[in-house]
Amino acid sequence: MEYYIMPCICVGVILFLIIIQVIMHSEHPVRSAFFSLIPGLTAMLCINLLSGYTSVAIPVSPMSLAVSAVLGIPGVTALLIIQRIL
C-alpha cells in the first residue's frame, strides 16, 4: 500500500464524521442532509459534463456518488484531489 493512501482515508473518514455530526445537530436533519446532497451531486455532474473541455472527470461509481452525496462539494473536491494524487 502506498504511503499516501492511509492519510487520504483518514481525512475522508474525519470529514464524513464532521458532516454527519453537523447534520444531526441541526434543527431539521433531513432537510440539512438533502441540501448537502443536491450541491454535491450537481458539482459532480458539472465536472463530468465539462470533462471534454477540461480533461478532468470523476468516474461514476457507487462510492463516488456516496461521497459526493454525503460530503457535498468538499467531498467532490476531495475526490478530485485524490484522483490527482493517485
Image: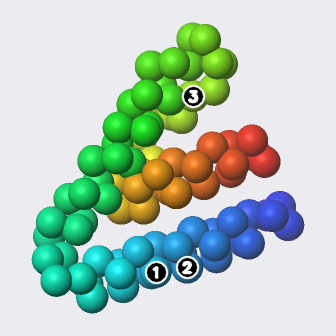
Q: Amino acid at mark 2?
A: Ile
Please give left or right for residue 51 compared with residue 25 in the image: right
Circle 1: residue type:
Ile
Q: Position of residue 45 (x, y in %)?
A: 39, 31
Disc with the residue nearer the chain's start (2 vs 3):
2
Classify mark 2: helix, strand or loop: helix
Residue closest to the eye, 44 or 2: 44
Q: Which mark is residue 68?
A: none
Residue topped by disc 3:
57
Q: Position of residue 33 (x, y in %)?
A: 24, 66
Tag 2 near tag 3, CB within 8 Å: no
Separation of residues labelled 2 and 3 (CA atoms): 24 Å
Mark 1, residue position: 18
The part of the image, by quadrant, that contains residue 49 is top left
72 to the left or right of 34? right
76 lies left or right of 65: right
